[in-house]
Amino acid sequence: MSPVRRRTRPGPGARPAALPGRCLFLVPLLAGALLAGACAGPAGDEPLPDPGNPAVAPVAGSLDLPWPDEGQAAVSVEGIGSLGTRGGQTPVPIASVTKVMTAHVILKDRPMKDGTNGATVVADRQAADESFSAGESAAPILAGHSYTQRRLLEIMMVSSANNVARLLARWDAGSQEAFVAKMNRTAAALGMNRTTYTGVSGIESDTRSTAADQLKLAGAAMKDPVFRAIVATPAVTPPGGVRIPNTNKLLGRNGVIGLKTGSSTPAGGNLVWATTQRIGGTSRLVLGVVLGQRAGTTPAQGSAAARDAGLALVTAVRKDLPDAVARAAGARG
Protein backbone atom coordinates (compact mmCIF):
# COMPACT_ATOMS: atom_id res chain seq x y z
CA MET A 1 0.00 0.00 0.00
CA SER A 2 1.10 3.58 -0.58
CA PRO A 3 2.30 5.20 2.69
CA VAL A 4 0.00 7.79 4.18
CA ARG A 5 0.60 10.36 6.87
CA ARG A 6 -2.04 11.56 9.29
CA ARG A 7 -2.25 15.30 9.74
CA THR A 8 -4.10 17.26 12.34
CA ARG A 9 -4.64 20.19 10.01
CA PRO A 10 -5.20 20.57 6.27
CA GLY A 11 -2.02 20.33 4.26
CA PRO A 12 0.04 23.02 2.54
CA GLY A 13 -1.76 25.40 0.25
CA ALA A 14 -4.91 25.31 2.37
CA ARG A 15 -4.86 28.92 3.56
CA PRO A 16 -8.23 30.72 3.44
CA ALA A 17 -8.87 32.74 0.31
CA ALA A 18 -11.37 35.38 -0.64
CA LEU A 19 -14.23 34.18 -2.77
CA PRO A 20 -14.12 35.43 -6.38
CA GLY A 21 -16.72 37.71 -7.75
CA ARG A 22 -19.14 39.76 -5.71
CA CYS A 23 -20.58 38.10 -2.59
CA LEU A 24 -24.29 38.71 -2.28
CA PHE A 25 -25.17 37.30 1.14
CA LEU A 26 -23.87 35.35 4.11
CA VAL A 27 -25.72 32.45 5.68
CA PRO A 28 -25.06 30.09 8.61
CA LEU A 29 -24.29 26.54 7.51
CA LEU A 30 -25.02 23.50 9.67
CA ALA A 31 -24.25 24.83 13.19
CA GLY A 32 -23.45 28.29 11.92
CA ALA A 33 -19.74 27.54 11.94
CA LEU A 34 -19.19 27.65 8.20
CA LEU A 35 -19.03 30.60 5.88
CA ALA A 36 -20.88 30.44 2.58
CA GLY A 37 -21.59 32.93 -0.15
CA ALA A 38 -23.41 33.27 -3.40
CA CYS A 39 -20.96 34.79 -5.82
CA ALA A 40 -21.33 35.87 -9.40
CA GLY A 41 -19.95 33.57 -12.06
CA PRO A 42 -20.78 32.05 -15.44
CA ALA A 43 -24.14 30.31 -15.38
CA GLY A 44 -23.79 26.56 -14.88
CA ASP A 45 -20.03 26.76 -14.30
CA GLU A 46 -19.70 28.92 -11.20
CA PRO A 47 -16.08 29.16 -10.08
CA LEU A 48 -15.15 28.15 -6.53
CA PRO A 49 -12.32 29.75 -4.49
CA ASP A 50 -8.88 30.07 -6.08
CA PRO A 51 -7.73 26.50 -6.93
CA GLY A 52 -4.30 26.83 -5.34
CA ASN A 53 -5.62 28.41 -2.18
CA PRO A 54 -9.15 27.19 -1.38
CA ALA A 55 -11.06 28.38 1.66
CA VAL A 56 -11.08 25.60 4.24
CA ALA A 57 -14.16 24.77 6.31
CA PRO A 58 -13.61 25.27 10.06
CA VAL A 59 -14.66 21.69 10.76
CA ALA A 60 -11.58 20.49 8.87
CA GLY A 61 -9.42 21.54 11.81
CA SER A 62 -10.88 18.78 13.97
CA LEU A 63 -10.25 16.06 11.39
CA ASP A 64 -7.13 13.89 11.20
CA LEU A 65 -7.13 12.98 7.52
CA PRO A 66 -4.55 10.49 6.15
CA TRP A 67 -3.13 12.72 3.44
CA PRO A 68 -0.71 10.89 1.11
CA ASP A 69 2.99 11.53 1.71
CA GLU A 70 3.65 12.27 -1.96
CA GLY A 71 2.02 14.13 -4.82
CA GLN A 72 -0.99 16.26 -4.04
CA ALA A 73 -4.56 15.81 -2.87
CA ALA A 74 -7.74 17.74 -2.13
CA VAL A 75 -11.11 16.91 -0.56
CA SER A 76 -14.39 18.82 -0.36
CA VAL A 77 -17.91 18.13 0.91
CA GLU A 78 -21.11 19.44 -0.65
CA GLY A 79 -22.68 22.04 1.63
CA ILE A 80 -19.68 22.15 3.96
CA GLY A 81 -16.72 23.15 1.81
CA SER A 82 -13.05 22.27 1.47
CA LEU A 83 -11.47 19.86 3.95
CA GLY A 84 -8.06 21.07 2.79
CA THR A 85 -5.34 20.21 0.32
CA ARG A 86 -2.02 18.43 0.44
CA GLY A 87 0.96 19.33 -1.73
CA GLY A 88 2.01 22.52 -3.43
CA GLN A 89 -0.76 22.52 -6.08
CA THR A 90 1.81 22.89 -8.86
CA PRO A 91 0.44 21.75 -12.26
CA VAL A 92 1.38 18.12 -12.98
CA PRO A 93 0.44 15.58 -15.69
CA ILE A 94 -2.98 14.04 -15.00
CA ALA A 95 -3.14 11.23 -17.59
CA SER A 96 -6.69 9.93 -18.23
CA VAL A 97 -8.24 12.11 -15.54
CA THR A 98 -8.30 14.46 -18.55
CA LYS A 99 -11.40 12.59 -19.76
CA VAL A 100 -13.51 14.12 -16.98
CA MET A 101 -13.28 17.43 -18.84
CA THR A 102 -13.83 15.70 -22.20
CA ALA A 103 -17.09 14.18 -20.96
CA HIS A 104 -18.12 17.43 -19.24
CA VAL A 105 -17.70 19.46 -22.43
CA ILE A 106 -19.53 16.86 -24.54
CA LEU A 107 -22.49 16.93 -22.15
CA LYS A 108 -22.51 20.74 -22.08
CA ASP A 109 -22.44 20.93 -25.89
CA ARG A 110 -24.80 17.99 -26.46
CA PRO A 111 -26.95 17.76 -23.31
CA MET A 112 -28.82 14.55 -22.64
CA LYS A 113 -31.90 13.91 -20.53
CA ASP A 114 -31.40 11.48 -17.68
CA GLY A 115 -32.22 7.94 -18.79
CA THR A 116 -31.86 8.65 -22.51
CA ASN A 117 -29.16 7.62 -24.99
CA GLY A 118 -28.54 10.97 -26.67
CA ALA A 119 -27.49 11.49 -30.27
CA THR A 120 -26.25 8.88 -32.73
CA VAL A 121 -22.56 8.89 -33.65
CA VAL A 122 -21.16 6.98 -36.63
CA ALA A 123 -17.64 5.78 -35.90
CA ASP A 124 -14.97 6.79 -38.42
CA ARG A 125 -12.07 4.76 -39.76
CA GLN A 126 -9.56 6.56 -37.54
CA ALA A 127 -11.32 5.44 -34.35
CA ALA A 128 -11.45 1.88 -35.65
CA ASP A 129 -7.78 1.84 -36.63
CA GLU A 130 -6.79 3.25 -33.24
CA SER A 131 -8.58 0.33 -31.57
CA PHE A 132 -5.46 -1.72 -32.20
CA SER A 133 -2.98 0.73 -30.74
CA ALA A 134 -0.52 -1.09 -28.49
CA GLY A 135 0.85 2.03 -26.84
CA GLU A 136 -2.30 3.40 -25.23
CA SER A 137 -5.64 2.48 -23.73
CA ALA A 138 -8.20 1.78 -26.46
CA ALA A 139 -11.52 -0.01 -26.96
CA PRO A 140 -12.76 -1.96 -30.01
CA ILE A 141 -14.67 0.36 -32.34
CA LEU A 142 -16.19 -0.65 -35.68
CA ALA A 143 -15.86 1.80 -38.58
CA GLY A 144 -19.26 2.81 -39.95
CA HIS A 145 -21.09 1.42 -36.91
CA SER A 146 -23.66 3.65 -35.23
CA TYR A 147 -23.18 4.21 -31.50
CA THR A 148 -25.28 6.20 -29.11
CA GLN A 149 -23.71 9.17 -27.44
CA ARG A 150 -24.26 7.53 -24.06
CA ARG A 151 -22.57 4.28 -25.07
CA LEU A 152 -19.48 6.12 -26.32
CA LEU A 153 -19.30 8.18 -23.11
CA GLU A 154 -19.55 4.96 -21.12
CA ILE A 155 -16.79 3.30 -23.13
CA MET A 156 -14.57 6.37 -22.75
CA MET A 157 -15.09 6.81 -19.00
CA VAL A 158 -15.41 3.19 -17.88
CA SER A 159 -12.62 1.64 -19.95
CA SER A 160 -10.64 4.89 -20.39
CA ALA A 161 -10.49 4.47 -24.17
CA ASN A 162 -8.34 7.14 -25.80
CA ASN A 163 -9.59 6.38 -29.31
CA VAL A 164 -13.18 7.00 -28.19
CA ALA A 165 -12.22 10.30 -26.55
CA ARG A 166 -10.78 11.50 -29.85
CA LEU A 167 -13.80 10.20 -31.80
CA LEU A 168 -16.16 12.16 -29.56
CA ALA A 169 -14.01 15.28 -29.95
CA ARG A 170 -14.09 15.05 -33.77
CA TRP A 171 -17.85 14.42 -33.70
CA ASP A 172 -18.51 17.43 -31.48
CA ALA A 173 -16.03 20.02 -32.76
CA GLY A 174 -14.69 18.73 -36.09
CA SER A 175 -11.17 18.18 -34.79
CA GLN A 176 -9.37 17.37 -31.58
CA GLU A 177 -7.68 20.78 -31.68
CA ALA A 178 -10.99 22.64 -31.81
CA PHE A 179 -12.35 20.54 -28.97
CA VAL A 180 -9.26 21.18 -26.82
CA ALA A 181 -9.91 24.91 -27.21
CA LYS A 182 -13.39 24.31 -25.76
CA MET A 183 -11.85 22.38 -22.86
CA ASN A 184 -9.53 25.25 -22.00
CA ARG A 185 -12.32 27.81 -22.23
CA THR A 186 -14.42 25.69 -19.89
CA ALA A 187 -11.52 25.35 -17.47
CA ALA A 188 -11.12 29.13 -17.42
CA ALA A 189 -14.84 29.58 -16.74
CA LEU A 190 -14.56 27.23 -13.78
CA GLY A 191 -11.63 29.17 -12.34
CA MET A 192 -9.20 26.34 -13.08
CA ASN A 193 -6.33 28.77 -13.63
CA ARG A 194 -3.59 26.20 -13.04
CA THR A 195 -4.84 23.83 -15.74
CA THR A 196 -3.82 23.44 -19.39
CA TYR A 197 -5.31 20.85 -21.74
CA THR A 198 -3.37 19.87 -24.85
CA GLY A 199 -5.39 16.79 -25.80
CA VAL A 200 -8.66 15.06 -25.01
CA SER A 201 -7.41 11.68 -23.77
CA GLY A 202 -4.63 12.45 -21.32
CA ILE A 203 -1.91 10.62 -23.20
CA GLU A 204 -0.17 13.97 -23.64
CA SER A 205 2.16 14.62 -20.67
CA ASP A 206 1.88 18.39 -21.15
CA THR A 207 -1.80 18.31 -20.18
CA ARG A 208 -1.38 19.49 -16.61
CA SER A 209 -3.54 20.43 -13.67
CA THR A 210 -3.73 20.42 -9.87
CA ALA A 211 -5.78 18.45 -7.36
CA ALA A 212 -7.69 21.57 -6.35
CA ASP A 213 -8.48 22.45 -9.97
CA GLN A 214 -9.72 18.93 -10.70
CA LEU A 215 -11.90 19.12 -7.59
CA LYS A 216 -13.64 22.14 -9.09
CA LEU A 217 -14.26 20.26 -12.33
CA ALA A 218 -15.58 17.20 -10.49
CA GLY A 219 -18.06 19.37 -8.62
CA ALA A 220 -19.35 20.90 -11.85
CA ALA A 221 -19.50 17.59 -13.74
CA MET A 222 -21.34 15.74 -10.97
CA LYS A 223 -24.23 18.22 -11.19
CA ASP A 224 -25.27 16.40 -14.38
CA PRO A 225 -27.26 13.22 -13.57
CA VAL A 226 -26.16 11.64 -16.86
CA PHE A 227 -22.51 12.12 -15.97
CA ARG A 228 -23.13 10.73 -12.47
CA ALA A 229 -24.77 7.62 -13.91
CA ILE A 230 -21.98 7.06 -16.45
CA VAL A 231 -19.11 7.25 -13.93
CA ALA A 232 -21.02 4.84 -11.64
CA THR A 233 -21.29 2.20 -14.40
CA PRO A 234 -19.45 -0.95 -13.21
CA ALA A 235 -18.63 -2.34 -16.68
CA VAL A 236 -19.29 -1.82 -20.37
CA THR A 237 -19.33 -4.15 -23.40
CA PRO A 238 -18.57 -2.45 -26.74
CA PRO A 239 -20.27 -3.98 -29.80
CA GLY A 240 -18.03 -6.75 -31.06
CA GLY A 241 -15.91 -6.57 -27.92
CA VAL A 242 -15.75 -8.15 -24.50
CA ARG A 243 -16.97 -6.91 -21.13
CA ILE A 244 -14.60 -4.26 -19.76
CA PRO A 245 -14.74 -3.49 -16.01
CA ASN A 246 -14.53 0.07 -14.72
CA THR A 247 -10.93 1.11 -14.15
CA ASN A 248 -12.00 2.65 -10.81
CA LYS A 249 -11.48 -0.26 -8.41
CA LEU A 250 -13.00 1.73 -5.52
CA LEU A 251 -16.39 1.83 -7.24
CA GLY A 252 -19.04 0.34 -4.97
CA ARG A 253 -16.79 0.35 -1.89
CA ASN A 254 -17.41 2.73 1.02
CA GLY A 255 -20.22 4.40 -0.86
CA VAL A 256 -17.99 5.32 -3.83
CA ILE A 257 -20.11 6.29 -6.86
CA GLY A 258 -17.33 7.37 -9.27
CA LEU A 259 -15.31 9.03 -10.71
CA LYS A 260 -12.12 8.58 -12.88
CA THR A 261 -8.68 7.05 -12.81
CA GLY A 262 -5.57 8.00 -14.76
CA SER A 263 -2.03 6.68 -14.82
CA SER A 264 1.16 6.93 -16.85
CA THR A 265 4.86 6.87 -16.12
CA PRO A 266 5.26 10.69 -16.03
CA ALA A 267 1.94 11.26 -14.23
CA GLY A 268 2.09 8.39 -11.76
CA GLY A 269 -1.26 7.30 -10.38
CA ASN A 270 -4.19 9.71 -10.30
CA LEU A 271 -7.71 9.29 -9.01
CA VAL A 272 -10.77 11.49 -8.75
CA TRP A 273 -13.30 9.87 -6.41
CA ALA A 274 -16.85 10.59 -5.34
CA THR A 275 -18.75 9.14 -2.42
CA THR A 276 -21.78 10.05 -0.34
CA GLN A 277 -22.18 10.28 3.41
CA ARG A 278 -25.11 11.17 5.63
CA ILE A 279 -24.16 14.20 7.73
CA GLY A 280 -26.56 15.96 10.06
CA GLY A 281 -29.51 14.09 8.55
CA THR A 282 -28.59 15.05 4.98
CA SER A 283 -26.83 12.95 2.33
CA ARG A 284 -23.76 14.89 1.18
CA LEU A 285 -21.62 14.39 -1.91
CA VAL A 286 -17.94 14.06 -0.97
CA LEU A 287 -15.31 14.58 -3.68
CA GLY A 288 -11.59 13.95 -3.57
CA VAL A 289 -8.57 14.01 -5.87
CA VAL A 290 -5.14 12.43 -5.51
CA LEU A 291 -2.43 13.13 -8.10
CA GLY A 292 1.17 12.15 -8.66
CA GLN A 293 1.27 8.90 -6.71
CA ARG A 294 4.49 6.97 -7.43
CA ALA A 295 5.32 9.18 -10.42
CA GLY A 296 8.15 7.75 -12.49
CA THR A 297 7.21 4.13 -11.78
CA THR A 298 5.02 1.88 -13.90
CA PRO A 299 1.39 2.89 -14.51
CA ALA A 300 0.26 -0.21 -12.60
CA GLN A 301 2.28 0.78 -9.53
CA GLY A 302 1.00 4.33 -9.72
CA SER A 303 -2.59 3.16 -10.07
CA ALA A 304 -2.31 0.94 -7.00
CA ALA A 305 -0.81 3.77 -4.96
CA ALA A 306 -3.56 6.21 -6.04
CA ARG A 307 -6.22 3.64 -5.19
CA ASP A 308 -4.77 3.08 -1.72
CA ALA A 309 -4.41 6.81 -1.05
CA GLY A 310 -7.97 7.44 -2.23
CA LEU A 311 -9.37 4.61 -0.15
CA ALA A 312 -7.65 5.91 2.98
CA LEU A 313 -9.20 9.36 2.48
CA VAL A 314 -12.66 8.00 1.63
CA THR A 315 -12.65 5.76 4.70
CA ALA A 316 -11.52 8.51 7.06
CA VAL A 317 -13.95 11.14 5.79
CA ARG A 318 -16.94 8.81 5.96
CA LYS A 319 -15.99 7.63 9.43
CA ASP A 320 -14.96 10.87 11.10
CA LEU A 321 -16.77 13.78 9.42
CA PRO A 322 -20.30 13.15 10.82
CA ASP A 323 -18.97 13.17 14.40
CA ALA A 324 -16.81 16.22 13.72
CA VAL A 325 -19.82 18.15 12.43
CA ALA A 326 -21.92 17.02 15.40
CA ARG A 327 -19.21 18.16 17.84
CA ALA A 328 -19.06 21.55 16.14
CA ALA A 329 -22.84 21.86 16.42
CA GLY A 330 -22.78 20.83 20.08
CA ALA A 331 -20.01 23.29 20.92
CA ARG A 332 -22.06 26.15 19.53
CA GLY A 333 -25.30 24.90 21.05
Image (spheres, helix red, strand yellow):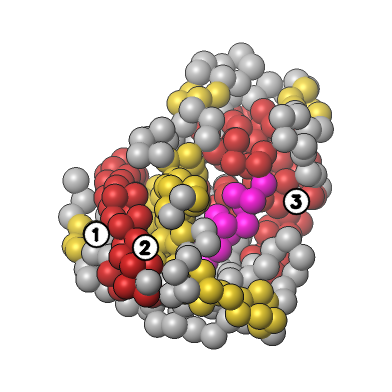
Element marked by disc 1: strand
Secondary structure of the magenta portion, mostly?
Answer: helix
* Cβ–Cβ under 8 Å for marks 2 and 3: no
Q: Residue at x 41, y 39 (%)?
A: 255
Q: Earlier in the sequence, mark 2 or mark 1?
A: 1
Amino acid bearing label 2: Val
Q: Residues within 10 Å of mark 3 (few under 14, many from 20)?
A: few
Q: Residue at x 55, y 38 (%)?
A: 231
Q: Residues within 10 Å of mark 1 (few under 14, many from 20)?
A: many
Query: Is 131 within the magenta?
Result: no
The residue wearing badge 2 is 325
Q: Residues within 10 Å of mark 2 (few under 14, many from 20)?
A: many
Residue 168 x, y percent position in the rendering: 71, 40
Amino acid bearing label 3: Lys
The residue wearing badge 3 is 108
Q: Residue at x 61, y 14 (%)?
A: 240
Question: From the viewer's perspective, is 329 left or right of 219?
Answer: left
Out of 318 and 119, give the one closest to the viewer. 318
Magenta-drawn segment: 209-224
Q: Is residue 66 above or below residue 124?
A: below
